[in-house]
Amino acid sequence: MTKEIGPAILLPMNEQSIRVLLGMVADGRVSIDAAVDDLRALPFEDMGFATLDHHRGLRWGFPEVVFCPGKTAEQVALICNRLAERSAQVLATRATPAQYEAAQALTPDLQYHSLARAIWLDRNPQRARKPGVVLCAAGTSDLPVAEEAALTADLMGHAVTRVYDVGVAGLHRLTPHVATLQGANVVIAVAGMEGALASVLGGLVRCPVIAVPTSVGYGASFGGLAALLAMLNSCATGVAVVNIDNGYGAGHLAAVINDQSQQAEPPAGERNE
């Protein structure tokens, strides 16, 4: 007799769980109708005010991320709750304490990173993280954006080595970290003001540098536009630029690059050295 799994028992939307469900159908433990019910939310779920992309986890291995500004506390809470039903990891960026309070009332195991301004959930915190991501921030004022990037990469399964307060105003502070930087698969450079840190790092390392301009600076920085243009005009090779204050975008891209870098490396015994 098959076990009826209906919509109330929701599987995470990732490749592993789909394979498990199909295997259960194949060996008769779950009926076809019950499996269809569980997959009904694919590829998306219409909540009326939001359409959740449950295919995101299948495509990227990480669920859709919630951008909180402009959403009510109730909307953020409901979206996070539905995502938490389908995934072991949840991330909502630029969240206010009020939005977090509403979200935690529905999903008690949600947590809040006050510096990164993010709601997050990780139901498998002990899983191994892949090394290879180095995160540099020019100054302490850049840390909210840097920590958003770090949290994103961590939730995606990557260990982040932080190198903070190494801006060009005191470049000697960067030199003790050169060996760490040169051993990275990808470097994130977070800087405001004139944004020069990205070019400096691009001239030191042999891996991609993801430059993140921040809105930190005086009037002529134009809310990060000066740093953005400086990073776009970098003469260093291998530097790519995300939008102003987009720590999430940098963290996600770093995770993807680090994944691809490690997949491309042959096992130690097969290297031709």
Image (cartoon, rainbow, N blue to C red):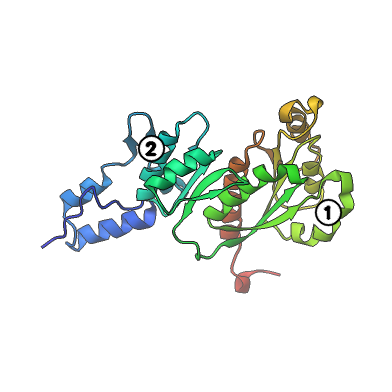
Going by the picture, which residue comes out furthest to the bottom?
A: 269
Quarter placement of the N terminus: bottom left
Classed neighbour count for the residue bearing mark 2: other residues with Cα under 10 Å, few (<14), some (14–19), many (≥20): many
Q: Position of residue 43 (x, y in %)?
A: 34, 40
Label at residue 52: 2
User: Count the marks: how many?
Assistant: 2
- Residue at 74% x, 35% y is 216
Name the residue type under label 2.
Leu
Residue at the spot 42% in from the left edge and 55% down from the top edge: 88
Residue 136 placement, left or right of 98: right
Identify the disc placed on residue 174.
1
- Which percent across, then down, holds residue 259? 56, 55
Binning the other alpha carbons within 10 Å of mark 1 as few (below 14), some (14 to 19) or many (20 upward) gives many
Quarter-of-image position of residue 268: bottom right
Where does the C terminus fall, quadrant-wise? bottom right
Farthest-out residue, left: 1
Query: What's the residue at 41%, 40% (across, down)?
Result: 77
* 44 sits left or right of 143 in the view: left
Circle 2: element type: strand
Up-down: is 170 above or below 53? below
Q: Of the residues shown, which amino acid type is indicated by label 1?
A: Leu
User: Within the image, what quadrant is residue 72 found in?
Assistant: top left
Question: Could you say where residue 35 lies in the image, as x and y percent from the top left?
Answer: 22, 51
Q: Position of residue 198 (x, y in %)?
A: 77, 43
